[in-house]
Amino acid sequence: MRLLIEGGTIVNEERIMAGHIVVENDIIAAITDSNTTPEGTFDHRIDARGCYVLPGVIDSHVHFREPGLTEKADMSSESLAAAAGGVTTFFDMPNTVPQTTTPEAFDEKCRIAATKSHVNYAFFFGATNSNADVLAQLDKHSTPGIKLFMGSSTGNMLVDRNEALNRIFKAAAGRLPVMAHCEDTEIINRNMTAFRQRYGDDPDVAFHPFIRSEEACIASTTKAIGLAKAHGARLHVAHLSTAKELELFERMEGERMGAITAEVTVGHLFFSLDDYKRLGASIKVNPAIKSLTDRQALRQGLTDGRITTIGTDHAPHLPSQKTGGCKRAASGMPMIQFALVTMLELADEGVLPITQVVNLMCHNPARLFEVRKRGFIRQGYKADIAVVTNKRPWTVNKSDIVSRCAWSPMEGHTYQWRVVQTLCNGHLVYDDGQLDTHYTGQPVAFR
């Protein structure tokens, strides 16, 4: 099949240019400027005039709930939500049932995705207190890295023994990056006890950022950085939530990727402490969304080189599981469908340029995890592409939500931006509201 994306504004590798893209089967065959019309016949044409053409988003932090938790979501439903949001590749986390902490569980996830995922897929391998020997034998070409929970969160995968932590970082050194959830569980438990004594068994969700506190985040992140440096391992700290944590990271210069890097999520960039009054437990996540001062610092980190990637930590729960306070309400929210348009909205507000949105959501995940032939609009690369426009405002209604959980904290929000088309491996998996539920994506290759 030969396809032409014509007349769009291409945003790629710090450049913004009007041009055309030729796709042959699943590969980008040619990129030309607007003055050079590609020759030949095409099986399909996409008129991108008035639109922006971006690389497909790589969301390196999702929880798609399969296997074992499919009442909330599954590989099919959430990959469709990804396609509707311009996301062409996802990396799924290991806290499923069973946990992805054995080669057998990893292989089973891959088999499920091969028949059910509608975009490209990869899976983190989970670290435990006792599987460091397995980590040292992982195929570095088939997984983005090792996921380490240094704080207790959904899924009960806490690794809290110093001996085990040292063995994990030693096993990872020189082979795979460690992506760490950093919160100090002892501090959190102490805070929870104090708040329950004062406010009852299930304190109001507005106290969540004080229970899963700044102190808990800094202590754990500091420890993770120390372990990574001691063993010469690559560390990517997931979902930073505080200004003080950000001070622990060096500024990335150009394309140079340091050994110790940080992710921030769309939720931590968009919401703040003040939003608990309006949205309650729907924005309860771990680590907690914190103050406006923290949010502002994280936003600044997007352009000063201290933040390397933007993820979603997409984590669907049923509405019934999102009721209650700090103890009872589940932590996590579905954001993959709305991540790109939210970041483009922040670009309109002057938080970061659109070229940096592409760096953080497309290019840098590909660089950091050494993804083969994806994450850029380049000749010879896989044709993973999102076409977006800022000329058709829309308000999020429940009927727009693709995720199986059927709710979003963005309900009622009006966007100027919308995703018009998503091409995954050259295939039009999303076309202006229509999803191709028959298409399946490809496994991602690394290094």
Image (spheres, rainbow, N blue to C red):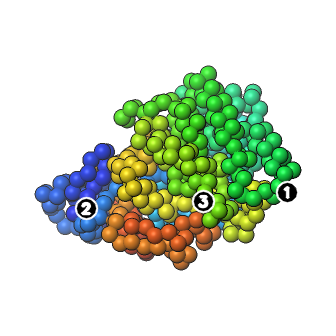
410 and 106: which is toward the camera:
410
Looking at this rendering, what residue extends furthest in the bottom direction?
Answer: 399
According to the picture, the residue beneath numbered tag 2 turns out to be 8
The answer to which of 63 and 311 lies nearer the viewer is 311
> What residue is rendered at 46% in x and 43% in y?
300
Which percent across, then down, holds residue 37? 14, 60
Instruction: Tell which circle, 3 or 1, labels the residue nearer the N-terminal end.
Output: 1
Question: Where is residue 187 shown, x and y percent of the image?
Answer: 76, 39
* Residue name at image x 76 percent, y 43 percent: 188
Tell me, yes or no, whether the two marked residues, 2 and 3, touch with CB atoms within 8 Å: no
In the picture of the structure, the residue carrying the numbered disc 3 is 275
232 or 241: nearer the viewer? 241
Say whether residue 74 is visible. Answer: no
Residue 355: percent from left, percent from top: 34, 48
Instruction: Tell me the mark number nearer the camera, choosing from 2 and 3.
Output: 3
In this view, the residue in front, 100 or 328, is 328
Mark 1 lies on residue: 200
Q: For residue 205, what is the image quadrant?
A: bottom right
Tag 1 secondary structure: loop
